[in-house]
Amino acid sequence: MRRIRVEVKGIVQGVGFRPFIYRLAHQWHLTGSIHNSESGVAIEVQGAAEDVAALLAALPSEAPPLARLDEIVIAELALREESEFRIEHSTRSQTANTLISPDIATCSDCLRELLDPSDRRFGYPFLNCTNCGPRFTITRSVPYDRSQTSMADFPMCALCQAEYDDPLDRRFHAQPNACWHCGPQLTLVDRNDVAQPGEPIAETIRLLSEGRILAIKGLGGFHLAVDATNAEAVRELRRRKHRGEKPFALMVDNLEAARALCHVSAEEAVLLEFPQRPIVLLRKQGRELEGIAPDGNDLGLFLPYTPIHHLLFANSDLTALVMTSANLSEEPIANDNREAIERLSQIADYFLFHNRDILLRCDDSVVAHRAGATQFARRSRGFVPSPILLSEPMPPILAVGGELKNAICLSRGRYAFLGQHIGDLENLAAYDFFLESIAHFETILEVQPEILAHDLHPGYLATQWAKKQPNIRRIAVQHHHAHITSCMAENHLTERVIGIALDGTGYGTDGKIWGGEILVADFHGFERAAHLAYVPMPGADMAVHEPWRMAASHLHAAFGLDWPNHAPALLAEIAPAKLRIVQQQLRNPQRLQQTSSCGRLFDAVAALVLNRTHVSYEAQAAIALEAVCDPFLSQGAYPFSIAASDPIQIDAKPLFAAITEDLRRKVPANVLSSRFHLGLIEALAEATRRIAASSGIRQVCLSGGSFQNAILAAGLERQLTNAGLRVYKHTQVPPGDGGLSLGQLLIAAHSL
Ligand code: ZN
Ligand code: ZN
Ligand code: FE
């Protein structure tokens, strides 16, 4: 006989962990108890030594899917007189640190019930259990309890209550538990909010099949849905949504349907079937659907994650649905029925509503499998508010992130809570969402920050908000320093690293726009060891939307005032008046905004190689350039010059001389793109090798939005690894600005 105490820390409250232990105790004839503790659960078990060992073995391997075990501490106790195993009620102080689970896709047990005509929840669009369903997006406050969620409006019927109270039932303490009798219901309305006759799911299917645009209320907000195989409907959605050419994500019924559109590796299949159900970026293959993702090689696919989604596919011939966040351009996703009608009546023909409120909006997450690891493009639904585990405890800090793809971060002990995707703050509705997100995180985490961390850029709205907060210590953090420390934090690095930060825009300590940076950094500071040589941005922000301007700038740098003669094909596309202005501006380049941005370098090369003058969304030109790159073409890298200055200047002048020569010889675009990618990789690797040799640092962190380019990321990692350096990258937070606040937070913590 043996009695032990087991303390489990991590996400073990509100995820079915206590009933899981209760069932194990029954199975192995153990006595004892379990209760929630400050930072997890505390278990005492007593029984035959081999049965106690069996329970311990099952802890990590059989834990419920939503549980995350960060630490297990075991202590031997003296035997006791005892005859049963009890789940003890928790006191308020014991649940103070309860972590709210993210929203999780319908589990296989629930799906079976949903499709089983003999089950009492057959076809019920809101069924869920301890292992699945809404959590974060329906929770108002803590402790996580039905009364604090938007399920408070739906008292459970006797049958649901009995399930909820039974420790052996898979709905024990499932706060959103509901059924046809007691739970939320669907309604279908037209754009004038007039209820439509008929069964809402069947009618929705009929309308989608006819090519109509539906606004469908989901977990974290509304989606706009159309039949993805109906090119006319897709075109109409783009037109009404003012969507330009930005790709749409598609929801498909299952892996087989995904494989009809894309190549799906074993690892990618795992990502698609993650209980978080992110959108997974996959390589297009097979059937090409018109107008869905015209630029790149990738298509974003995801599988159904709510009972409503499953019902739409199970009862129809639909194979793929466009499911795009219901908003205009970069506004936040709509989440409320009235708001949806107000904002979307010009876009959607019909609205599939339900009466369970979404208390916090949360967009779909986007991931890709890149070079053997998961890479986030957006970390939101399904992952938020799961924390990032840090290497040591932090004081309470709020980091407010950047301007684009904003996400906030709040620390509590060893956890960093990265918030959901907010969007671009220059948009007023997104700014309101930003404020809402801060208030909500402070509430559910019960944290009052003592320090604010913000970007160095004085014009960012997040910076301005931070500067207005009274009586709090503030730390301004350089953008690329934050990128690198974000990568350090999730990899638990504390020593100095070489950080390669590549992105579109970040405010430098010299007031210039940085974005092609190699830093030597730790949490206390950084030195700029190398950067792409500065070039002017004719037209400032206009250069982001009109990549030909960056081509003009680089050509001017390479050839001087004779530059227009070196790209006749591209410049033939530009209105003469516009061209004259840029020519004028480049006569006095020192008066223009200067940039070392990697994103703008991609723009310049893409404009020349693809003869592309304008883009309709950020990074479109770079994505198109990557799409034509064939990394297996070995035609030699384009040259950069790498000056032995401090910081090292990586200059693209020789590259543009070589590109214009190739353009004259009508070398095909795939060769040009490959030579450019390889040239940039070799230049960055060479500069990094020099910095490693002079500093003795062997650890290299890769961060910044440009690392979403798979060829650049994989190629650079390979060259650095071959040079004997240890490469670290992002696998838990996005390399882009969606992961910025984590890095800001760590720098603020170390400024004390
Ligand atoms: Zn379930
Ligand atoms: Zn019920
Ligand atoms: Fe950035």
Image: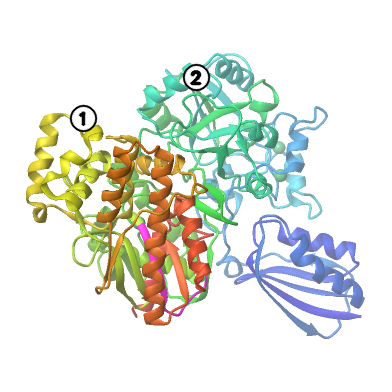
Residue 165 belongs to the span the image colors magenta: no
Distance, label 1 to label 2, CA atoms, is 32 Å
Amino acid identity at mark 2: Ala
Q: Earlier in the sequence, mark 1 or mark 2?
A: 2
Q: Quadrant of ligand 2?
A: top right
At horizontal 58% and vertical 16% (from top left) the residue drawn is 209
Relative to 655, is 384 on the left or the right?
right
Q: Nearer the viewer, residue 396 or 502?
A: 502
Quadrant where the N terminus sits is: bottom right
Q: Nearer the viewer, residue 382 or 609?
A: 609
At horizontal 23% and vertical 61% (from top left) the residue drawn is 468
Quadrant where the C terminus sits is: bottom left
Disc 2 crowd rating (10 Å Cα; few below 14, some 14-19, many 20+) is: some
Placement of 374 over or under 234, stated as above or below: below
- Residue that label 1 marks: 572
Residue 217 screen position, x and y as percent:
52, 32
At horizontal 40% and vertical 69% (from top left) the residue drawn is 499
Q: Secondary structure at mark 2?
A: helix
At horizontal 74% and vertical 42% (from top left) the residue drawn is 108
Q: Is residue 453 visible?
A: yes
Residue 480 screen position, x and y as percent:
34, 64
Amino acid identity at mark 1: Ala
Colouring: rainbow
Disc 1 crowd rating (10 Å Cα; few below 14, some 14-19, many 20+) is: few
